[in-house]
Image (tube, rainbow, N blue to C red):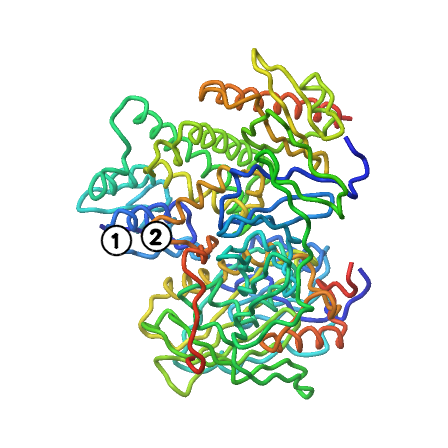
Amino acid sequence: MLSDPTGSWTPVVLSADLPPGTVVPARTPAGPIALWRSASGRPSASADRCPHRGMRLSHGFVRGETLSCIYHGWSYGQAGNCLRIPAHPGLAPPETIRVATHPVEEVGGVLWVGVGEPATQPPQLAGLVPLRSLQARAGVAAIEAAAGAKADADGLLETTQGSQKIHLLLACQERDETLIHVLLEGEGSVAERVAASRAVEALRRKAEALEMERDAP
Amino acid sequence: MKLYDYILSPSCYKVRLMAALAGVKLDIRPVDFHPGLEHRGPELMALNPAGSIPILEDGDLVLTESSAILVYLAAKAAPDWLGGDAAEEAARVQQWLSFSGRLTASLGGARLHEMLLRPGDIGALQAQGIAALRELEAGLFEQSLRGQRFLVADRPTVADIACFPYVALAPDGGVSLDPYPTIRRWSRALRALDAFIEMPGIHRLHELKPEPHIESGEA
Amino acid sequence: MTQDAMIDEWYPVGLVSRLDGNGRKTALMGEPIEVASDTDGSARVTSKGRVLPVRVRYGHVWASLGQPQKELFAIPEADQPGRRFVDVGVVRVRCSPLRAVENFLDIAHFPFVHTDILGSEPHTEVQNYKVEIREDADEVWATQVKFYQPQAARSASGGITTEYMYRVPAPTCSVLYKTCPPRPGEWDVITLFVQPLAEDLCDVWPWMALFDDESSMTDLIHFQQTIFLQDRSILENQIPRLLPLDPGMEIPTRADLTSVAYRRWLKRRGYTYGAQLVAQ
């Protein structure tokens, strides 16, 4: 996996987990972000902090094409500019009030957030269908050990669990935590997808046990 | 029906929420749980020797287990919320009703410790809470694969109401909900139900109403 | 942490009504303390064997780790006949004690956080009000604060425009005076007393002195606990946990003039326990 995150993409959430009109928290090498999708379906990523009183914007709400802070209702557009301050309904917020934004790409059913200005597009993940995301209290090395495979430069690894081929897209979070996106080769039946989900739960248990062993004195 | 109620208790909130969704009017009797410890006083102990709330009184029926109260309210006023009779569906309802007790013990214990300074091993409570949240996340995810948005079916049941409050309030006990995308979607679906009511710590979904505009000059 | 002017202030450390001989172990600005009733029933607060200065007032036991230069601030309404005094009880919050006070001074969040109780859309506008640092009393005051409220108090049955006065008589305490529906001409008193456990952790002890002969004591407690618990989830999610005193770190508007004055007063007095002085 890449060691210098600048100019790279981080897979933060599956498309299905960000329906229109919602906001979710996510972590990237650029810090915590609020990832939101407008009513019309456009995804945006902003810093997860309202510049007014520091409240996490991922606790906020999406109305139409704006993200609002839950604390005082300040709303922001996709470009991060403040559009409305409810305490002063007649005031056009000055340009200086804005939240930092990050590039977002939606590729292959995954939402990617860029750190800096990536020169390339996120990986295509051709032929792979996202299943679910889960967080592990284990570093990439422990997950690789549990999966018996190494992740490539995009953070993707392939493992066989039982009779199923499963692909894991790994994103490092802070302090030996890893976000795992599970991808399958094609849709598969409901039973196959349930089995894959359970197999990855088992893999996570194994990786976390390995991580604990590593940490033990 | 009379509910002995504490506004900050997620278990009491289950009952208030179920009643609101089922259209049942409750006669609320507030209990000074904190700081007064009224639930341990003689009047309440006579009703419920376990010293816990909620307590639901209806005639000479006294119920002290929140899951039983949910079932009673649903059976009386909104039988759809009981889930279907088919073996699997009925069993799933029971599975999650029992599971909700683990949420109370873990996330509820952590919340009482972190918020109201009740004793407890906070590390253990939080770890058990995280284990329960992971189980719920996996269960809800499998349901979504079956095309069902809720714990038992594609419509909410008493099982969802039994599990929702302690989950939604997990951050009160220092347990983050950030890592659970399926729980987030489920929680949102419940909060968006008609007649849904909040409790302190669960904010209004302001997006359900359009942005209001006000005529200039109006207060 | 260097010595802070806040060391000589009084802080709430427990409810008088809950004092007992066994003692309650708690903390004050990082120091473990114990709050107990003495053999004669008076309150006794100790830190590592050292007996701290103590006051018993407004339903609470107050203590100081330093040498208080001033007496505990006065709330004359606490001696007014006809009022009911409400011990709301403690709530712990993982935030700076100063953030807890600042939130208490804020009205613009009512429609979004205390929806349908203390505020509701579209009534979000904060009209101009007056703020001053009263040098003689060394207190921050905001007056003529008005806001439309759907249910301003336990005793209110419909929406009214409520008037408030806010007062900060100590760095971690605020006293709110609020229109009193049953008694025009009088003010209900609602306080927020904050015990700083650490710079980013506090125990909050709301207390009230109300004119309300209708509501039960439990109703009054629950109303205030409801309001505070709605705030708690905000307070635990503000970044940074400490209150930034660097003006570049957070952007105020006219609605925030009380908070601007509060932050300025804290900085001027060197009340910086729980504050962040420079942006990080």
- Residue drawn at 64 percent across, 43 percent down: A105
Q: Position of residue B14 (x, y in %)?
A: 36, 45
Under mark 1, the amino acid is Leu
Q: Nearer the viewer, residue C99 or A147?
A: A147
Looking at the picture, which amino acid does disc 2 mark?
Asp
Q: Residue furthest top?
A: A163
Does dot 1 land on a helix, a strand or a loop? loop
Q: Quadrant of residue C92?
A: bottom right
Q: Nearer the viewer, residue C141 or A30?
A: A30
> Which dot marks residue B62?
none
User: Residue drawn 70% across and 39% down?
Assistant: A121
User: Circle 1: is it few (<14), some (14-19), or many (20+) Cα within 10 Å?
Assistant: some
| Residue B5: mark | 2
Q: At numbered mark 2, what does the secondary structure look like: helix, strand or loop?
A: strand
Read off the chain for label 1. B
In the displayed structure, does residue B84 sit left or right of residue A29?
left
C-beta proximity under 8 Å, tags 1 and 2: yes
Residue receiving disc 1:
B26
Seen at 55% across and 53% down, the residue is: A59
Could you say which is closer to the camera, residue C76 or residue C251? Answer: C251
- Quadrant housing the N terminus of chain C: bottom right
- Ranked by sequence position, the earlier of labels 1 and 2 is 2
Say if residue A198 shows up in the picture: yes
